Image (cartoon, rainbow, N blue to C red):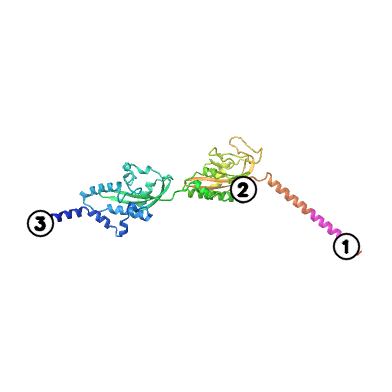
Amino acid sequence: MKIFALTGISLCVLVFICVFSDMHKALAHGKHADASKETVTAAGATESRDALREFVLHAKTHWEVPVTDDQSLDLWHEILYEVQHKGDWKSGSNYLILVDKQGRCIAHGYYESAHGRDLTALRDAKGTDTVHKLIEAAGNNKDGGFVDYYWNGTPKSSYAVNYTVDALGIELVLIGGFHHEELIPSMGEVLGKYVPEVKAASVKDKSTLKNFVEKTAEFVDHVYKTTQDNMDIAELLRVSSGKEAWKHNEIYLFAITDQGLIVFNGNNPNMRQASTMNAVDENGVNIEERIIKVAKSGGGFIHYLWDNPLVKGDEVTEVGKSSGTSLKISYVKQIKLGNNIYILGSGIYPAENADDKGVESTVLRAIIIGCLVVLVLLWLVRWVISSRRKKG
């Protein structure tokens, strides 16, 4: 009997030890009251943004369990192992990352060699410091937050939440993410579906000139947003310049930076960042300064002297001077693409001495009208005289 009693006591002790040793796992899963949320692991984290969020929070809950001091280090080693090996927290391209508040990698579910590296040195396709944004998102809300960015040409969403490691006595950031299925369309793909609405051939006067530049700005902005900055404005305008989109006779589009550097010239599409518009015309107008000032004030019309492609003999080749002597009226507009500012513009060349011709036509009309009035008066005088003679 004593042997059976001792055996029973020993079994009870062993069961208690096993249960107690795994208690942190049971407690961890028990913290999620909603059973459906407990099952969100790496394999299911790609189903939706909500699934990704629950995956990261479930991992946080799984590891944030009360343990004794002598067990805390063992728990930390278990966490590192689970992050870096396949299982609930790593499946294919879905994994977790632990970083400290400065962005230094503590554990990486995909690249074990990333341990100890400063991940803030990495940038996404748009040059964004994604890791700092994730650390900021985790600190803005106790339940964490999302950050959307682009990696290897595809959109990606990550979720970050603060996580305290008792064994180390520090607060880390726990991150999980997944790639979206859709790809960012290339500039060529966008141009295959979307073309400039208004072309240079539509320009007839100041009103149509303004509309041409405004619609061009909308076109460029649309392509920029659709491709998620996967475009170069000079290349976009050059590629889309077919069928006289940006040039018709003497009308052409130009684009410069806010520093005056030419990035596109519709009259010469191959001209790219070749020069600036820092020139003064014969009337003393600094063309570059005038364009930038008007564009930054909301856009508008400017008058200056420039080379008309259809006029021979108006060219000027002197350094620092305007390229020609023909009167040009341009409409300019500023457009912001990300952190870069560009100015789009185009102009018309009014007929030379248009004001003189207007005065001449007015005088001519006055003379004709005067002659008609005199003729009418003479006819009336003759009619009166004729009437009196008949009565006499």
Per the rendered image, the range of residues in magenta is 371-388
Instruction: Name the quadrant of the C terminus.
Output: bottom right
Distance in Å between CA atoms under marks 3 and 1 = 157 Å
Any magenta on residue 386?
Answer: yes
Please provide percent x and percent y for residue 384: 86, 61
Q: Could you tell whether 285 is left or right of 87 in the image?
A: right
173 is within the stretch colored magenta: no
| Foreground pick, 178 / 340 | 178
State the residue lying farthest toward the left: 2
Position of residue 289 relative to residue 65, above or below, is above
- Tag 2 or tag 1, which sits nearer the N-term? 2
Residue drawn at the location 68% of the way across and 46% of the way down: 354
Q: Nearer the viewer, mark 3 or mark 1?
A: 3
Q: Secondary structure at mark 1?
A: helix
- The front one of 285 and 322 is 322
Residue beneath disc 3: 4
The answer to which of marks 3 and 1 sits earlier in the sequence is 3
Sort mark 2 into few (<14), some (14-19) or many (20+) by Cα contacts within 10 Å.
some
Tag on residue 201? 2
| Residue 387, label in figure | 1
Q: Is residue 141 visible?
A: no
Which of label 2 and label 3 is nearer to you? 3
Name the spot of residue 39 as percent of width and height, x first.
Answer: 31, 56
